[in-house]
């Protein structure tokens, strides 16, 4: 196995497993909270507790990456972050009231509730990549 391939595989696995491990360590510590977002008099229910845990996980993973990994491999780091976030997405639960209300209301915003964790993952990974690019420019 080539050393470069081994290094890339190590980076991917480190990022993926650090996301998974840190998330499942922090998940019981932060209480679940439900919040409501109102758009055009339609309510969207958010699981704010999951979002807090996920962004805290990304912050801890960012610190681990800056301390332990090569920060110049942005593509490999991105792949690791995405692969680590996939199992974490299964832990997002639409709040109970949101599920009940979305059954009785026939609106397109009710479907939007299911896409909130995916948007949080995309936004979070984008923020980590921007921070890594800024760090690479500062440390040059």
Image (cartoon, rainbow, N blue to C red):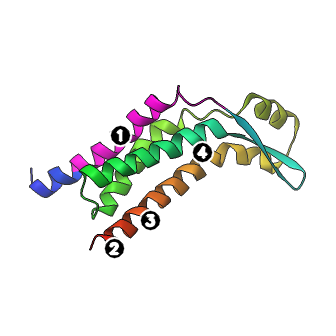
Residue under label 1: 18
- Along the horizontal axis of the image, is 56 left or right of 13? right
Residue under label 4: 117
> Which mark's residue is nearer the viewer, 4 or 3?
3
Specify few, some or many for label 4: CA neighbours under 10 Å numbering under 14, 14-19, or 20 or more: many
Give percent across and percent down for residue 82: 42, 49
Please report whichever mark, 3 or 2, sits nearer to the chain's N-terminal start.
3
Specify few, some or many for label 1: CA neighbours under 10 Å numbering under 14, 14-19, or 20 or more: many
Residue under label 2: 137
Question: Label 1 vs label 3: CA separation?
Answer: 19 Å
Give percent across and percent down for residue 64: 32, 47
Residue under label 3: 130
> Which mark's residue is nearer the viewer, 1 or 2?
2
Residue at 33% across, 73% down: 137
Q: Main secondary structure of the magenta part?
A: helix
Give percent across and percent down for residue 115: 64, 47
- Along the horizontal axis of the image, is 35 left or right of 39? left
* Magenta stretch, residue numbers: 9-32
Secondary structure under tag 4 reads helix
Are the residues flagged by discs 3 and 2 in contact, CB closer than 8 Å?
no
> Which mark's residue is nearer the viewer, 2 or 4?
2
Please report whichever mark, 4 or 1, sits nearer to the chain's N-terminal start.
1
Residue at 58% across, 41% down: 52
User: Residue 18 magenta-drawn?
Assistant: yes
> Which mark's residue is nearer the viewer, 3 or 2?
2
Question: Label 4 vs label 3: CA separation?
Answer: 20 Å
In depth, the one of 5 and 130 nearer the eye is 130
Secondary structure under tag 3 reads helix
Secondary structure under tag 2 reads helix
Question: Label 4 vs label 1: CA separation?
Answer: 19 Å
Vertical side of 32 occupied by 135: above or below: below
């Amino acid at each position: 196995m080539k050393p470069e391939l081994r290094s890339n595989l190590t980076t991917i696995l480190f990022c993926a497993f650090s996301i998974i491990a840190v998330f499942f360590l922090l998940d019981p510590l932060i209480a679940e909270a439900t919040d409501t977002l109102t758009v055009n008099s339609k309510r969207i229910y958010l699981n704010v507790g999951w979002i807090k845990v996920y962004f805290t996980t990304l912050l801890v993973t960012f610190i681990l990456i800056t301390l332990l990994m090569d920060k110049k491999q942005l593509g490999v780091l991105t792949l690791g972050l995405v692969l680590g976030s996939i199992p974490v997405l299964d832990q997002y639960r639409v709040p109970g009231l949101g599920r009940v209300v979305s059954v009785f209301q026939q609106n397109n915003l009710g479907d939007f509730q299911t896409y909130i964790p995916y948007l949080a993952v995309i936004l979070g990974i984008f923020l980590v990549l921007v921070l890594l690019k800024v760090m690479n420019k500062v440390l040059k």
